[in-house]
Image (cartoon, grey):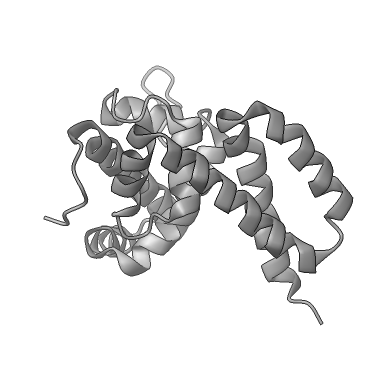
Amino acid sequence: AHNWAEYAATKRSYELIAKHVLPQFQGQAWSTLQAKARAEASRPELAAAQIKAVETRIKELIEQDEERAAKAERLTSVPGVGPVTAMTLLGEMHELGQVSGKQIAALAGLAPIARDSGSKQGKRFINGGRKPVRDTLYQAALVATQHNKPLKDFFQRLKQTGKPVKAALIAVARRLITILNAIIAKKQMWSPA
C-alpha cells in the first residue's frame, strides 16, 4: 500500500523543482527531466529517487557558484526555510536582496491589493507575482509557524485578533520573504532578535 498523500506532495515538490528551479541553472537538463517525469509519474516508488537525484543535482549546481551557495546558506539559516524554499527563491527571485521589502512582497504575489472605489473601501487580497514562489513561501510559512518563535508569535497574535488562519499564514509568508530579503541584502545569517 502506498501513502498517496505523501506521494502527491512529493510529486508536487518534484514538479515545482523541475519546472521552476532547474531551468534557471541548466537549460539542457530540463527537457530530459521533463520526459522522465512524464514517463515515470505513475510509479511512486521511483518518484522519491528522482526527487533525490534532482535535489542533489541542484545542490551541486548551487555549490559550484560561491555567491549562490552563500545565499542558500543564509536563507536556510532561518527556521522554516528548507532547501526547496531556498532553491526556489534562488531560481525565481533574482531581485532578492536588491529591492525593498514591499517590492519583494509584490514580486512574490504576497502584497495586499486594495479593491477600493471612491469612498467605498473593499477587501484586500493577494494577486499576481510569481506563483511558484508564493506557493513555496506558503509552505515555508506553515513550517515557520511551528518552528520559528518570532513568526509563531506573530501568527498567534494575528489569530487572536480574529484574522482567518489562511490570511494569517499569508501575512507570515509576507513577513518571511521580507526577512529573507533583508538577510540577503545585509549578507547576514538569521538572528531572531
Who's the residue at 28% across and 63% down the image?
148
How many marks the image carries: the answer is 0
In this view, the residue farthest toward the front is 64
Q: Is residue 53 or residue 42 the one in the foreground?
A: 53
On the rendered structure, is 36 left or right of 85?
right
Question: Which residue is depicted at the point 33% across and 62% down?
Answer: 159
Regarding residue 125, the answer to whether it shows in the image is no
Residue 187 position, x and y percent, is: 20, 37
Q: Nearer the viewer, residue 86 or 129?
A: 86
Q: Quadrant of the N terminus?
A: bottom right
- Residue nearest the observer in this picture, 101 or 16: 16
Q: Quadrant of residue 89?
A: top left
The quarter of the picture where residue 8 lies is bottom right
User: What residue do we see at 34% from left, 60% from top?
Assistant: 162
What is the quadrant of residue 23 in the picture? top right
The image shows residue 118, relative to residue 4, as above or below, that is above
Residue 140 visible, this angle: yes
Query: Residue 172's spot in the image, x, y percent?
Result: 35, 51
| Residue 96, image x, y percentages | 35, 30
Q: Is residue 26 above or below residue 79?
A: above
Q: Nearer the viewer, residue 51 or 8?
A: 51
Is 67 on the left-hand or right-hand side of 20? left
Q: Position of residue 176 (x, y in %)?
A: 33, 47
Assign the C terminus to one quadrant of the image: bottom left
